[in-house]
Image (tube, coloured by chain):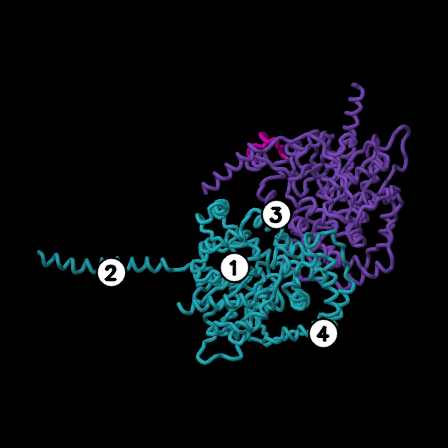
Chain colours: A purple, B cyan
Amino acid sequence: MLLEVFLVLGTVVIYFLLSRKEEATLLPLKEGWWGKGQKPDTEEDKTIRPFKVETTEEELSDLFRRLDQARFTEPLENSRFHYGTNSKYLRKVVSYWKNQFNWKKQVEVLNKYPQFKTKIQGIDVHFVHVKPPCLPEGQSAKPLLMVHGWPGSFYEFYKIIPLLTDPASHGLSGEHVFEVICPSIPGYGFSEAPHKKGFDSVSAASVFYELMLRLGFNEFYAQGGDAGWLICTNLAQIAPSQVKGLHLNLALVTKMGVIHLLSVLLGRYLPGLFGFQDEDVKRMFPFLQKGLYKSLVESGYAHIQATKPDTVGCGLNDSPVGLAAYILEKFSTWTDPEFRDLEDGGLERKFSLDDLLTNIMIYWVSGCMVSSMRFYKEALQNGLGTQKHDKLTVQVPTGIASFPNEIMHTPQAWAQKKYINIVSFHFMPRGGHFAALEEPELLAEDILQFVGKVEKEQLWRKKGE
Amino acid sequence: RSFEYSQKNAVLIPVAALGIGGILLYWLRSRHKIKTIEMGDGWWGSGERPLKGKEDESIRPFKIETSDKEIEDLHRRLEQARYAQPLEGAAFDYGFNSNYLQKVVAYWRNQFDWRKQVEVLNKYPHFQTTIEGIDIHFIHVKPSYVPHGRAVKPLLMVHGWPGSFYEFYKIIPLLTEPARHGLNEADVVFEIICPSIPGYGFSEAPHQKGFDSIATARIFHKLMNRLGFKEYYLQGGDWGSRITTNMAQMLPQSVKGLHLNLVFTGLGGLRNMLSVLVGAYVPWLVGFTREDVRRMYPFIQKNFYQILQESGYLHIQATKPDTAGCGVNDSPVGLAAYILEKFSTWTDKSFLHKENGGLESKYTLDELLTNVMIYWVTASIVSSMRYYKENISKDPGLSTDARIGVHVPTGIAAFPQEIMHTPPVWAKKIFRNIITYSYMPRGGHFAAFEEPRLLAEDIIHFVRKVEKL
């Protein structure tokens, strides 16, 4: 026992001595070519082509055939959602999917916003581009790039887009109005999947940077959660002079130091010493249970996706029911961990089956589950916190909306080590991981107030020059 | 006066002698008293355990069957399979390569003959019997010819995941009729019992939570008892190793010998970590042999990184088995990719870099697909995955209880391509009575399937040593 204690202390001391301060240099743009085979000599086609989601009778009948032949396994008695998605509830979802869900109608819903495709670094990138319906005199729309994550899609933003392009009509302050660009991460939805190894978050950020330039934007805001958090962070690190502000609803710590270890051990008793607020303590402790144990129980998917994406994705790309089970489990547990105690995973308390199934259908009709999972391997295969971007800070003005049921809570004290220019940090009253879909008003309000602060600061600076 | 003194002594001394003798005897006895795992009891059927009536203990013959409907359904699913293009140059680095998978599926659809394979499976006698509320499936193979005067040794062989009783089909004849197969140690002959772990293959899946290796160990003891055996040998790898080890810890008096091709020592704690660090420079100081060193170092890369690389399935199955298993129970192609990835990587780690995963260099597609079909036709993949959650949530380190230890004669066959190498010096901490420890010349995790001869030879060699004792 004593030996263990000494070793831990020794490691702590050595680590402390060896750890270096964060650097404040630029993250280089990652040039790449992700198309099939060899990069052609000809110049890339840079046109932006309109795109519409389509479906066919064949696609639908194939789906129904698979739903009809689905094989389920009885859940253990009283297991609810503790062993994963409960197949009794899954049967109900599949029944709705077959009999009530109307994919043709949902395709029309998807097509209500203008969508486009353009080739960047060898692959077709899909995006939604929504301009404000009416701009007040003298006001200009601020470009806002919103990036989704896994297992989400551009569709997650469909409720929040109108609140940002036309806030006044929705009871929000009309001071700032946005034109919103929601791309699909390459390998997700209607964006082509990279054909080469190595497409990580920095690659995605570089592609989106090119996209924004191609759309004619010199300055823009970026918003993201889940993978979108990482991609937007990298974007802010690549092009700090172009990213006016970075808004996040997730901000994980990837580089842990001695301070983190100490604050986990002692933060409950000396919160002030580590910069913890009451709400931080409430959300983080007891740490063993809420931090360590929870992340172990909930990270199996990340582990297998970061190592064997092609294996785990194979069955999911062939069985829509398996795909639904896999994705719905996250929409349940990541919205509220207590939903694991419910027979139906609490899914319909916060989302409609139509919304949930539309998101799943995007993965199904595009056949992108495997490529979406590869993103984890590309990002994590060298270990957590080992990449160059993990070691660099973010100087761009940052706003963080901290939702109570987010998978892991990051206190401001930890976030500001990386995001050194935090302009706003708010504890949201309710909501989980899929903030834009679950609590669009709360998220929109926070984005608006954040942008308000950034714009005021800029104006003040300009006046001062 | 001296008479009184001698009278007192005449009483005192024998009493004292008895007392001390008694204490001595008790101390000697308690030192040899082996601690065991509690047997306990269980009920795994649906609903409440019936209060009245005794459990049906009959042993019913069983035959695997198939139908046109089953085969047509399979073919339809194989034909409609959707594949994702692999990344350029990925081989098996990202998991099962879908280009090679398409070739496997083409064979499966057009050449693989399930009816013929069912006949192969039925060549050994199958049975089912109800224990603790669920149907337990097993095969029971007796030697067709017993040399005069030889006793036949009962041997229980337990499979693991993602294997099945079928893994033993090649080794069974080598153990029931060694002489006929050119094995020299012809004075040891076995009758083999291979059960399916509840939740796997043709054994019913438990309906209640909590079914772990200890419950399995107890059920298999009951099975052997029901078959009329009082003493028997055990053999296992993967989960089979854990189950047979638990059996040896539960009822040591029934276990004549325990043979393992995988040893669970967990991470071994800090002391093992230290001996790894020190052992890199002075292996003899921590008791590592040269072969140990060859198999274990460079440790960080070989073991720690490799374990992380290869344990994603374990992590997700130990936490969300119903989610992980759902799609693969509905897509035979997904099931094949998931299972066969293990048959590739766990047979030889270098197979990761081959476009075809090296599968057909060690196995035939017929045998690989027969194993996959067992999971498919019984729809047992989800329940097989739950076994990880039930065991690992109780014991995350997957160690063997060292306080109880294992005292029955033990034989260990260490195959070079096994997922993790356990040096004898570590195994000795738990297995207190190791009779044989063999560094096998070749072979990986699925020893019985891949190198049946080598494994059979080692089992026979071990049992001969135990019997001569």
- In percent of width and height, residue B194 lies at 56, 69
User: What separation in Å lies between label 4 and label 2 (alpha carbons)?
Assistant: 75 Å
The residue to which callout 1 is attached is B414
- Give the side of residue B156 with respect to residue A327, left or right: left
CB under 8 Å between discs 3 and 4: no
**Closer-to-camera residue (A69/B269):** B269
**Discs 3 and 4 lie in a common subunit:** no
Q: Earlier in the sequence, mark 4 or mark 1?
A: 4
For residue A108, above or below residue B455: above
**Magenta region, residue range:** A268-278
Disc 3: CA contacts within 10 A as few (<14), some (14-19) or many (>=20)? some
Q: Is residue A274 magenta?
A: yes
User: What separation in Å lies between label 3 and label 4 (alpha carbons)?
Assistant: 43 Å
Q: Is residue B419 visible?
A: yes
**Discs 1 and 2 lie in a common subunit:** yes
Label 1 element class: strand
| Amino acid tagged 3 | Leu
Task: Tell which subunit mark 4 falls on.
Answer: B
The residue to which callout 2 is attached is B18
- Give the side of residue B419 with respect to residue A328, left or right: left
| Amino acid tagged 2 | Leu
CB under 8 Å between discs 4 and 1: no
Which mark's residue is nearer the viewer, 4 or 1? 1
**Closer-to-camera residue (A384/B323):** A384
Residue situated furthest top in the rendering = A464
Which mark's residue is nearer the viewer, 4 or 2? 4
